[in-house]
Image (cartoon, grey):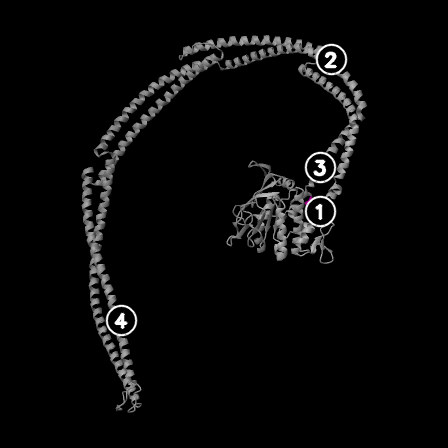
Amino acid sequence: MRPRELTLRGFRSYAEERTFEWQGRGLVGIVGPIGSGKSSLLDAIAFALYGRTPRIEKGQKSLINQRHDAMQVALTFEVDGTQWKAVRALRRTGTAAHALYRVEDGVDVVVADRAREMGDQIEALLGLDFDAFRRSVLLAQNQFADFLEATGTARNQVLKGVFGFDRLDSMRAVVKARLDVLDKQLATLAGRRATAETDAKDLESKRVELVAVEQRAEALDELRLPFEEAKEVIKASEIRLAEAQSRLERLGDVGDRIPDRERTELVFADVGDAGGALGSAEEELAQAGVAHTELAAHNGEMLEEVGGRSGLEEAGDLVSAWKAERTGVAEAEMRLESARAAEMAAGALAGATQEALVDARRSESDTQLADEGARLRVVEARTSLESVHEAHRVHAIRYDLVTGEACPVCTQMVSVVPDLESPVSLDASGAAVDAAEEEARQATDTSRKAAAVAAAAVADAKTAEDADATASRQAAEAAELLDSLRVRLNDTAAGVSDRLGTGDPEGLLAALRTEVVRSDGAVADAKTIEQAALAKVQKLQEEASGAQTVLASLGTELATLAGTLDLVVEIGEAPESLQRALVALREEWIAQQQAASDDKAKAGEEASAARIALRDLLDAAGLGESDDVVEVIAAARTERTAKEAEVQLLEKRLGDLEQLASDEAEFDASAEVLRTLHTDLSPSRFLEFVLDERRRALGDLASEHLEVLSAGRYRFDESGDFLIVDLTAADGIRSPASLSGGESFLASLALALALAEIVAREGGRLDAFFLDEGFGSLDPEHLDLAMDGIERLVTSGPDRLVVVVSHVPAVRDRVEDLIVLDRDDATGNTLVVSGASAP
């Protein structure tokens, strides 16, 4: 199996779709930090082939990327020159998909589309089941020693697949199938011998029976022609009898549908009555129409005087407007009176607030003058206190001055020490300052209160002034509104007079409306009478039309019946014409009914005579009336054919017996050869011998590789069980389980190198190896040896692929063709840095 291309999407850390090409590559290294998806590439190859991975064999939905709902893996690979494509897909919810294709001229041809069927095909193509694959082709992380430490049965399974020995099982199955065929033939021969005497006796009796059956068949054949002729006569008579009966039934139906005289006379009477009543009703309708027209004209003239119904409505609107405007004028007069009273009150309040404002401003000015005076007295008291402090300091310095020495304050030479009087007391000056400050605080407080009163007075005066202005404006607006309402009321009153005349508008409007209602009622009554007359006319018209329809229906019915009887007769619309047609129809019906009765009687007589003749034929052949001659003849022929077949079969059985007897010796000899071959091909004999030879050859070659890889310390023993010979401990034998991790890796690698080399010598199909980690446990010397062996493994085949997964820097340095991966810290997804395509 040689991989060509791997495509994966949503598989573990590979969120987005990525394709990795393996065509033309030999030794490929997969490198990257921990968690970057290195081992996942090998898992994807195993999953595409077997639907399983070395690390996760169950719960495969955990292989789906945590941010995706589905994943898909597709692997294109080559086996013995034929390209194949394995595709598998999983969904978190829903069914999985599995498909194996054979690639023919670039076209994918479906070979299997179910998981079990696909698995069987893969195992047949690779010659390896999943366990054998992961022990020999894909050495997964921490699973390098699986083949080394496997049981003998597990190793045999791997070797059978790798070397193609599974074909021996197929050969043994073919031998068994051929042996089963020979055994059946021999059993048949024995059975035939046992029945040979019975077959000979049966043959004689069957030949006698065949002669009797043939004579019976010939006699029945002679009866066939007259029997069929009699049957034809009976069939034709029955058809004519049925036709005559059908005509009688149809004529009976026609007789039931021919109208009688009473019905036609009633129809003619209805037509005449309906015409007279319709003329009277049409005269009443004309009179009602004239009355309705005259009343409607009078009503129109009356409404025209007031401008029609719209004018009447306008007059009503004018009266309603006049009433509303008169009410509005009264309300406006009341609002004007109220506004003028409010104006007087607001003026008085504004005058009072102005006087209070003047008083408040005068008080504010007085308190401000007092506050300023108190502040000046504080300044004077503080100035005086400072002078007293200065005098005390000078007085104190006076005692430290010495004539001819420097002054401690100004550093000048003192020429004369002055005489000073005792200064004023500091306590008295301080008390004067405190009194002045207290007086100033009280004056400031009084000034602030006066300012607040003045500010309030200003606000009150402003409010009163605004209220006075508002009241004046409202009074003016009320007077203006009253004037405009009075003008509108006068205009509306003039309009009412023009419409209704002088007088009370409401009374005039009510009288006019009463007269209009009375006139409308009279018009409506006249219209009702006219509509009733019209309805009566329409009803009588419908009755007359119905009578005419019945008359026409009668004509149509007579025409239909005449057509049924094939009678040509003139049918007019007048009652007399219809009556004549009815008489002719009845006469034709009687004549046709008599003819049908005659035909029926004649056909019955012919059928009876034919049945008597048929009965005579059946009696002559020994058959009953219930027997079907055609079926009896067919049964006789079938019986003759069956007897002939029985005779031929017995003759053939006796003939085959002679041939089988002559072939018996050859059958026995072939069966003995096949039994011996089937026994020799059993797993316990030939296959065990071949596998034992292969294990020993593998052990010998692997020992050479292991001795090189372990720097001369280890070899495999010669038993074929792959025990370890420790060359540094007196050739002691050790179990593979006793090796360290690095030593187990070297031993497993030695087996892989030897296995690949043997397969290559014999033209086998082991064209790819996948090694996942394991190098970290090796020291630099053994790592170089391991890499040398891997490079030899690559070059030992013409198109071999070896993929090495490692995070060891030394491995990375030894491999030129690298697939470099990284990890997205934010999502955990794999980032392909380089190497997805072949270099």
The image quadrant that residue 620 belongs to is: top right
Within 10 Å of disc 1 (Cα), the crowding (few <14, some 14-19, many 20+) is some
CB within 8 Å, label 4 to label 2: no
Q: Which residue is mark 2?
A: 215
Q: Is residue 836 magenta?
A: no
Q: Nearer the viewer, mark 3 or mark 1?
A: 1
* Dot 3 alpha-carbon crowd within 10 angstroms: few under 14, some 14 to 19, many 20 or more: some
The amino acid type, in three-letter code, at marker 2 is: Gln
Residue on which the image places disc 1:
697
267 to the left or right of 612: left
**Location of residue 79 in the rendering, given as x and y in whole percent from the top left corner:** 62, 40
Which numbered disc, 3 or 4, marks the residue closer to the eye? 3
Principal SS element in the magenta part?
Answer: helix
Q: CA distance from mark 3 to mark 1?
A: 24 Å
Residue beneath the point at 22% across and 69% down: 360
User: How far, Cα to Cα, is label 1 from label 4?
Assistant: 123 Å
Name the one closer to the observer, 323 or 134.
Answer: 134
What's drawn in magenta, residue-wise? 155-159
Q: Is 37 or 222 nearer to us in this picture?
A: 37
What's the CA distance linking mark 1 and mark 2?
A: 83 Å
Residue 448: which disc? 4
Q: Quadrant of the N terminus?
A: top right
What's the residue type where badge 3 is placed?
Met
Q: Earlier in the sequence, mark 1 or mark 2?
A: 2
Q: Is residue 505 visible?
A: yes
- Which residue does the image show at 63% across and 54% down from the upper left? 785
- Pick whichever, 69 or 796, lies toward us: 796
Q: Amino acid at mark 1?
A: Ala
Is residue 141 visible to the viewer in this orientation of the structure? no
Label 2 sits on a secondary structure element that is: helix
Please say whether residue 158 is one of the residues in the magenta stretch: yes
Measure how far apart labels 2 and 3 are at the Cα level: 59 Å
